[in-house]
Amino acid sequence: MPHPTTTPTPRICPNCDGFATVAITTGSRDRHGHLPTLTIDCRACNGQGTAPARRVREGARV
């Protein structure tokens, strides 16, 4: 009987620790008194927060 294949679970991005999108303030206020922010995505995971699962090679050292 064939075993069902399971997809490996994605791992958390090591660069952003899963916090893929951040809001950074510019430090100044506009003429209406609002504090503008920039939304920046992690470059390594493109704002997803996960990295591809590592392939486990049979017989490889961990």
Image (cartoon, helix red, strand yellow):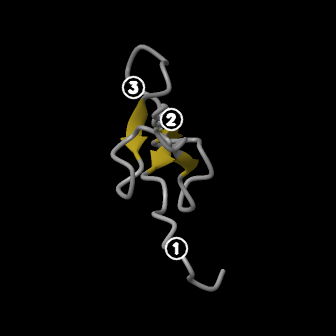
Residue on which disc 1 sits: 58
Residue on which disc 3 sits: 30
The tag on residue 40 is none
Which three-letter amino acid code belongs to the residue tagged 1?
Glu
Which three-letter amino acid code belongs to the residue tagged 2?
His
Question: Residue pushed farthest bottom?
Answer: 61
Q: For the point 48% across and 19% down, which residue is it?
A: 34
Q: Nearer the viewer, residue 1 or 38?
A: 1
Q: Residues within 10 Å of mark 2 (few under 14, many from 20)?
A: few
Q: Which numbered disc, 1 or 2, marks the residue that appears first in the sequence? A: 2
Where residue 35 sits: x, y (%)?
50, 26
Cβ atoms at labels 1 and 2 below 8 Å apart: no
SS category of the residue bearing label 3: loop
The tag on residue 3 is 2
Q: Residues within 10 Å of mark 1 (few under 14, many from 20)?
A: few
Q: For the point 42% across and 50% down, which residue is it?
A: 42
Question: Residue pushed farthest right?
Answer: 62
Q: For the point 59% across and 44% down, which residue is it?
A: 18
Q: Which of label 2 and label 3 is nearer to you?
A: 2
Question: In the rendered view of the protein, which quadrant contains the C terminus?
Answer: bottom right
Q: Residues within 10 Å of mark 3 (few under 14, many from 20)?
A: few
Where residue 12 sits: x, y (%)?
58, 49
State the separation of the CA atoms marked 3 and 1: 58 Å
Tag count: 3
